[in-house]
Image: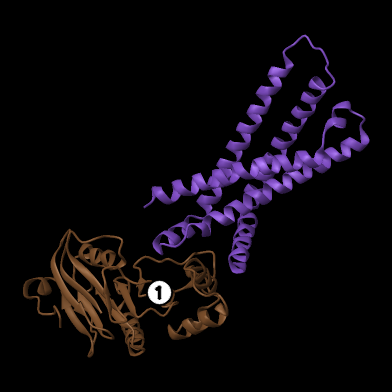
Chain colours: A purple, B brown
Amino acid sequence: MVEKIIFSLQESYRHIIFLPLKSSLYFLSLLINHFLSIICLIFYLNLHILKYELLYPVQEFLYLCFFFSLLSFFFINTSFIRYYLKFNYKEIKLIKTLEANPDYIRQPLILTSLFMNFCSLLLIINLFSILYNKIGYPGLGFLNLGFLFSFLFLLSSILLVGIVYYLCNKEFAGRQ
Amino acid sequence: MIIFNKVSKDKLKNFSLYIKAGELLCINEEDQDVLKTIFELLRGREKPEQGVIRYQDKGVYSSKAPGNFLGFVYRENLLLPDRSLEENLAYIMQVRDLEMRNHHVMVRRILDIVDLQHCSNKKPGDLLEHQIVRANIAQAILSYPPVLVLEDPFSKLDEVNGRGIINLIKRLNKFSMTIVLLNSSGKLLLGKGVRQVKVKEVFLERKDYYG
């Protein structure tokens, strides 16, 4: 068990180190994605809780923003995880030839994406906590950062595990 | 140890053969498709259209090879190009769920058996063709299987290096490892102690069936 965890850590470290440009792009796109979704949430809180009355249908627009944020999160992850899989094609071939457990490809991928997601989310939440202290923006007062972090991390983890499983199954089924 | 009983699959027709425990057997066939079929049948990835293959392990016959009963040396190079030979073998040990405790010692011991200890830090790109074949043999014997099946290891080698690989195979055979050598190159001097069969002969006369 311990060896498997160390192996997954080593392999995910390898993903990040050997693909520095792709990893930083992945990190940056996740960062922007989380930033925009939290900004949308703050606007929503301002409108919904403080009951600002606007002439324009902003709420509907915000719902749309949430939907697109989720969609972009999905596409960012799919494209980058697919790239990590392509980077690992020799390992995939080896695992297929030896008829080994595909978890040896899956688990490092899940770990890499979760690590990236965790780091970007942590950075954004910290940024917003600094904003919270410095700016007296009313919407921030209703933002429970701890809860938001847990909720977003849980949601994104479920999505990421699903994406990795889907892509890996496709990869392992397609070449047999 | 392994019995092919009237096995038919694609180009392989009515193939019967008994492979005894501890023997060094060379199956000669120029048609590589036939060798590939035999290899895939032994791997269990393909099933015979007719006939059966039986494996005997610890006195019990079964139609499926028991775990860790067969070791396979593939024709293509399986080694990962961005890792050293030692790292490659450690990776293979990990994905094959072998015992990883003291894996450095085990890998070095295996590399010593195949005469590649001096290449442990080299990457596959830096290895010569015969060293790659030796490394592929090393990955197959990591779990010390009782039977080793080699898929045409001499196809890319010259005579001198081929002879070196034959010596290595004979040395493995002396450790009471049963060797099944699938060979497509005709000009190969295997020497004494090697039972050589041709697929067509076995098919016509069936003289090797049950010894």
Q: Is B134 on the left or on the right of B42, as rendered?
A: right
Q: Nearer the viewer, residue B126 or B150?
A: B150
In this view of the protein, can residue B23 be seen by the observer? yes
Residue B117 placed where, x, y %?
50, 83
Which residue is the extreme one toward the left? B205
Crowdedness near tag 1: few (<14), some (14–19) or many (≥20) residues, C-alpha within 10 Å: many
Does B175 sit left or right of B207 as displayed? right
Q: Which residue was labeled with disc 1?
A: B140
The answer to whether B19 is drawn above or below residue A48 in the figure is below
Going by the numbered disc 1, the residue's amino acid type is Ala
Residue A1: x %, y % from top left:
59, 67
The residue at the point 80 percent across, 20 percent down is: A47
Please tell me in which quadrant of the rendered image residue B176 appears: bottom left
Task: Report if residue B153 is visible in the image.
Answer: no
Question: Residue at coordinates 58% horizontally, 53% vertically from top-left?
Answer: A109
- Please tell me whether residue A64 is drawn above or below residue B153 in the rendered image: above
**Residue at left 25%, top 79%?**
B1
Check disc 1 and report its element: helix, strand or loop.
helix
Q: Nearer the viewer, residue B207 or B171?
A: B207
In the figure, is residue B45 to the left or right of A116?
left
Q: Is residue B121 left or right of residue A172?
A: right
Q: Position of residue B37 (x, y in %)?
A: 23, 63
The image shows residue B77, relative to residue B162, as above or below, that is above
